[in-house]
Image: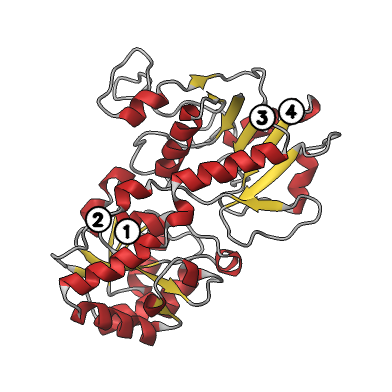
Amino acid sequence: MKIGYSAWGFIGDGIEDSPDGGRLTRALFIEHLIKTNYEVIWLQQNRDIDKNNEPLFDINKSYDDDQKNTLCKINYNDKFPKLDVLFIEWRWKIHDRNTSVDISSKYYTPDYDRQLELLSYYSSNNTKIIIWDKDEKIEKDDYKLFTFNVDNSIQILSPAVYPIKDNEYPRKTLLFPCDLDKIKNTKVNTEIRYLLGYVGSQYERDEQIYKYINPFSCHFPNNTIFAGNWLKYPELKKRNLVNFPRITFVDRVLPKDMGRIYNRCLASVLLCKKNYAEHCHITQRIHEVAANGVIAIGLSEQKGIENFVDGSLIISDAYDLIEVIEYIYRKSINDRQILLDNNINKLEPFDIKNVMSEFNNILRCMNLK
């Protein structure tokens, strides 16, 4: 089966100052698509290049890493190859980046225009299309971008356990995958510098910072570290330094380097946007922290979070957060390990084997298997 894959981002490490936090899960997902004997054709710009501007995943190269050797089997095509299914990681309009900007500008990115081309071409050919709305950005007005004449021609997927209800295009769940076999037996961190750590950017999470993190950081000053775009933009930097004075902010790190932040942290709060909370949209943060020996703390406002985080680690306000951190900190290393292991055991639905099983079921429902 030929799967045309459209995503604006990286499969490898990529560049450091990029908002593409999904590159680890994308690499794992594509690796297992290929291992399932699907032919993967990358349809967006190949951004995985080395310091010499050469392709990072080159079939003529030999890697020690099994995943990289597998990813070398990706084919790259900037035209319109024959496909069995078009798979899109949804891109949306971003002012002055992919819309309302001259294509000659250094700020222009072709992701949205290329996505429109692909949708127009493959929908007119009645090719089956799967859209993974990883950021919950599809709006009803976007539906006009695809018209279909065949039953089961399109399927929208969401990383939410309880996807947005839509009678026109009912959504199904596809969670962000992790390699649970590699996460199991992770040791809880023992050299603690920060009580709380978070590797992720600010996007639409201010309300929860004010509600949970800011009061906590005032109670335990200089014990919270956030890595991301929090200080990237001058106006935002000034606001964040004034509004969140007790939080230590550092720049983005490559996904492979997030351990440099997390290995000094005791716990991490699973922050989420309002619509993520309503639909139990769980980001990859949940398995990233577990893989780095950090104990995840969930928010009671997030529907269904009790299925993925130990009940003793779910909070409803800053007071709860202080209580839970003190509860964890007082525990012996062995008891902290039990908390981490309990959280890891709850990651089973995210395991790549289960995610691939769900994806294959989706293909079957679309008469593609």
Cα separation between marks 4 and 3 = 6 Å
| Position of residue 368 measured from the top left corner of the image (x, y, whole percent) | 69, 31
Choose top left, top right, bottom left or bottom right for residue 98.
Answer: top right
Residue type at numbered disc 3:
Val
Residue ID at (34%, 12%): 60
Cα separation between marks 4 and 1 = 39 Å
| Position of residue 114 measured from the top left corner of the image (x, y, whole percent) | 62, 30
Residue type at numbered disc 1:
Ala
Residue type at numbered disc 2:
Thr
* Residue 85: mark: 3
Of callouts 4 and 2, the N-terminal one: 4
| Tag 4 and tag 1, C-beta contact below 8 Å | no
Question: In this view of the protein, can residue 64 be seen by the observer?
Answer: yes
Residue occupied by mark 2: 186
Q: Mark 2: few, some, or many residues within 10 Å (few <14, many ≥20)? A: some
* Residue 127: mark: 4
Residue type at numbered disc 4:
Thr
Of callouts 4 and 3, the N-terminal one: 3
| Tag 1 and tag 2, C-beta contact below 8 Å | yes
Q: Please tell me whether mark 2 sits on a helix, a strand or a loop.
A: loop
Cα separation between marks 1 and 2 = 8 Å
Residue occupied by mark 1: 290
Cα separation between marks 2 and 3 = 37 Å
| Tag 2 and tag 3, C-beta contact below 8 Å | no
Of callouts 1 and 3, the N-terminal one: 3
| 66 lies above or below 189 | above
| Tag 4 and tag 3, C-beta contact below 8 Å | yes
